Image: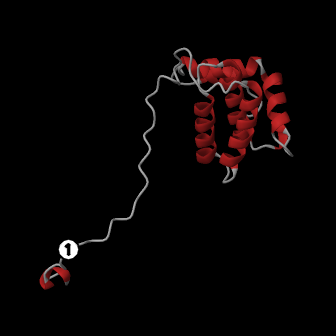
Amino acid sequence: MKGVAPAEILTDLPVAPEDYAVRLVEGVTDRIVEVDALVSAHSDGWTIDRMPAVDRWILRFGTYELLAEPAVPFAVVIDEAVELAKQYSTEDSGRFVNGVLAAIATAVRPDGGQTATEPSPRAARPPRTARPPRTARPPRTGPPPPAGLASGL
């Protein structure tokens, strides 16, 4: 909602948000100048005001996580931000969010920051399982099937 502080929205929700969500909203709000400066510096050709609102807030939350949540691996931050952008924003938003957050991650976590060093609500989630790639079946060897089976009966 335009013109309403994010913390206000949290207090008006019918169900209490998770503590981690509150921490993110409060953290972005407290460090908005720093977060926006990083997003602006790493989004070539785009100003914060010209970005779609969804992209802007996804980038803000991701940037704050990269800055203030070192226990969350940067790959997790980027992956979840990209998924949100793909689902809730424009067709090109996933690629845009990925590029900007990857550049920010390189700047703010020069050591890679890939390994979680302490427990975090995000790091504690079970990993997603990827499906194995589809492979072609090997050609059938041996005698051909009986005539009745080959024609489908």
**Residue at position x 26%, y 71% in the image:** 140
Name which quarter of the figure residue 134 lies in. Answer: bottom left
Q: Residue at x 59, y 26 (%)?
A: 73
In depth, the one of 89 and 100 nearer the eye is: 100
Residue sitting at x 82%, y 23%? 34
Name the residue located 63 percent from the left edge and 35 percent from the top edge.
78
Q: Is residue 146 above or below residue 75?
A: below
Relative to residue 56, is residue 24 depicted above or below?
Answer: above
Q: Report helix, strand or loop for mark 1.
A: loop
Give whichever of 115, 130 is nearer the camera: 115
Whether residue 109 sits left or right of residue 71 in the image: it is right
Residue hosting label 1: 142
Crowd tier of the residue under label 1, counting other residues whose Cα lies within 10 Å: few below 14, some 14–19, many 20 or above: few
One can see residue 15 in this view: yes
Relative image position of residue 91 (x, y in whole percent):
66, 54
Closer to the camera, 30 or 59? 59
Q: Could you tell me the amino acid type at mark 1?
A: Gly
